[in-house]
Image (spheres, rainbow, N blue to C red):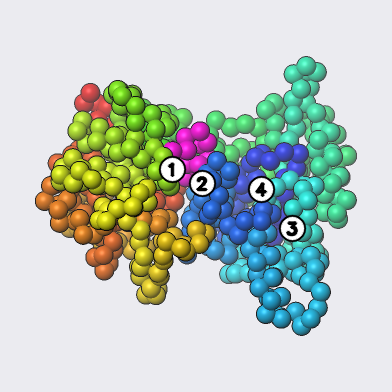
Amino acid sequence: MTRYIFITGGVVSSLGKGLLSASLGALLQARGYSVRLRKLDPYLNVDPGTMSPYQHGEVYVTDDGAETDLDLGHYERFTGVSSRQSDNITSGRIYQQIISKERRGDYLGGTVQVIPHVTDAIKEFALAEQDGIDFMLCEIGGTAGDIEAAPFMEAIRQLSIDLGKGRSIFVHLTLVPYLAAAGELKTKPTQHSVRDLRSIGIQPDILVCRSEHPIPDSERRKMSLYCNVSETAVIPALDASSIYSVPVSYHNEGLDIEVLKAFGLAHSQGPDLSRWEDIMDRIENPEGEVTIAVVGKYTGLKDAYKSLNEAIVHGGIANRVKVNVEWIEAEVFEKADAIAQLENVDAILVPGGFGKRGTEGKIAAARFARERNVPYFGICLGMQMATVEAARNMAGVKEAGSSEFEAQTNPVVGLITEWVRADGSVETRTEETDLGGTMRLGAYEAVLKEGSKVADIYGKTQISERHRHRYEVNVGFVEKLEKAGVVFSGMSPDGELPEIVELPDHPWFIGVQFHPELKSKPFAPHPLFASFIKAAVTHSRLV
């Protein structure tokens, strides 16, 4: 029997519902329960795939090719449970499905309405693919009172009734702000947020209260009284030094105990938190530090590189070092002498991105790393630009470039028009294809060259990694580039798509077409990031 935990937010956005959901999932796992986590987003985009990173942060990609909310990255990193297409839904996708049914006549001439058609579709999504798990955690995007979130709130209210007594609870995350002028915390925003929920028939079972200051018992009693919640179920959520300390912090405040109590489950035996205690010991007691330059296009918003940043942290955890990240806008290196900013870093990472802006800066960063023997990690566009740099300056192809940025008769990087999916089906694309959901998305296998650096790092010659890109390195340039000293150490199983390039005479220079950061976890750092940070440590000791 699967039990449901509905997680809502109030007062303001960005309080950390995703982190709360992920941490609670980790705590339930630590008690021996199985979990899945889902995100219900009220916006009208079908998925976040066409959104600017500055609008929505990174797009998290699942093994089965879904472009999803970045909170699913938190879910995977904290629980190790692989997310699926069925774990993220938006208003846009719900309405798209309903309108398609209406056009086909599936509603038999009936009037299509928010209730019951939209709410039924949301409930159907929430109930799908339970797989016999113990707990399904469903996070609702937005905040209580939002117009666009109203159908989702109504759907989970109905679902709590449909499931029956003892099968669901509501956890509400709010803000308890501190007013410096008054010198006190204010509980009224939380009271108003809960009042909004109760007005639509939802009574929270647990309140989680974000605050920059400790919440006195008197204020917890006040929120308990006015919000109709047990005092022990008012859980403080103070700012943490690391997101990986949050599961232990929530346990210390009694969150997992209150959840089990609400379901009438035994809670006397505590969770096994040794995994998280070891992670925090490695973070808080490093045996050294390194500085990594991330040369990107969206450095103004760190959420645009959320999984990347966490994977770098994981590489530090694996090597027990603190990793300092310098976020540098790629366009900076398109100016004279700006490349000197890289003189004092221990390694350089160039991540993915779309469009021409900043690409020459990424090429300059790749050249600096190659010529100065600085560890270099290129991901997606970072791999493509490293290949273009090698074509220009090692293979003598001076006009080397990408058709993503300008028309070229024989581009080193070009639009991929056909590829074979993992299930054997053939995907095709053209320049006129819609932007949304048309990239090479999800998990694909690659074959690694025997004796290569990446084969040594992975410890095997067959891997599966997640992709999100529309352009590929042109396989027609492989022979010319390999004669110049570049090794294509990873290829698609059919040998048509370059997956990994490396420089064998360089201390650590690797570019990958996929996104390894999407599979990294604090308790299982991705081998490429662990090796990259190790190379940075070695470099720091040489200079």
Mark with earlier residue (3, 1): 3
- Tell me which label, 2 or 4, sits earlier in the chain: 2
User: Label 2 to label 1, Cα distance in Å?
Assistant: 9 Å
Asked if residue 309 lies left or right of residue 502, the reply is: right
Image spot of residue 229 (x, y percent): 83, 45
> Quick one: label 2 or label 3, which is nearer the N terminus?
2
What type is the residue that disc 1 sits on?
Answer: Leu
Q: Which quadrant holds the N terminus? A: bottom right
**Mark 1 or 4, which is nearer the eye?**
1
Look at mark 4 in the image and give the residue it sits on: 256
Q: Secondary structure at mark 3?
A: helix
SS for callout 1? helix
Tag 2–tag 1 contact (CB < 8 Å): yes
Label at residue 58: 2
Compare residues 161 and 132 and report the one nearer the observer: 161
Q: Nearer the viewer, mark 2 or mark 4?
A: 2
Q: Give the magenta part as a residue range.
A: 297-311
Name the residue type under label 3.
Phe
Q: How many neighbours does mark 3 have within 10 angstroms: few (below 14), some (14-19), or many (20 or more)? A: many
- Residue at (67, 28) in percent of width and height: 212
The secondary element bearing badge 2 is classed as: loop
Residue 3 is situated, as x and y percent measured from the top left of the image, at: 69, 62
Which secondary structure class fits the magenta region best? Answer: helix
- What number is the disc on residue 308? 1
What distance separates the C-alpha of mark 1 from that of mark 4? 29 Å
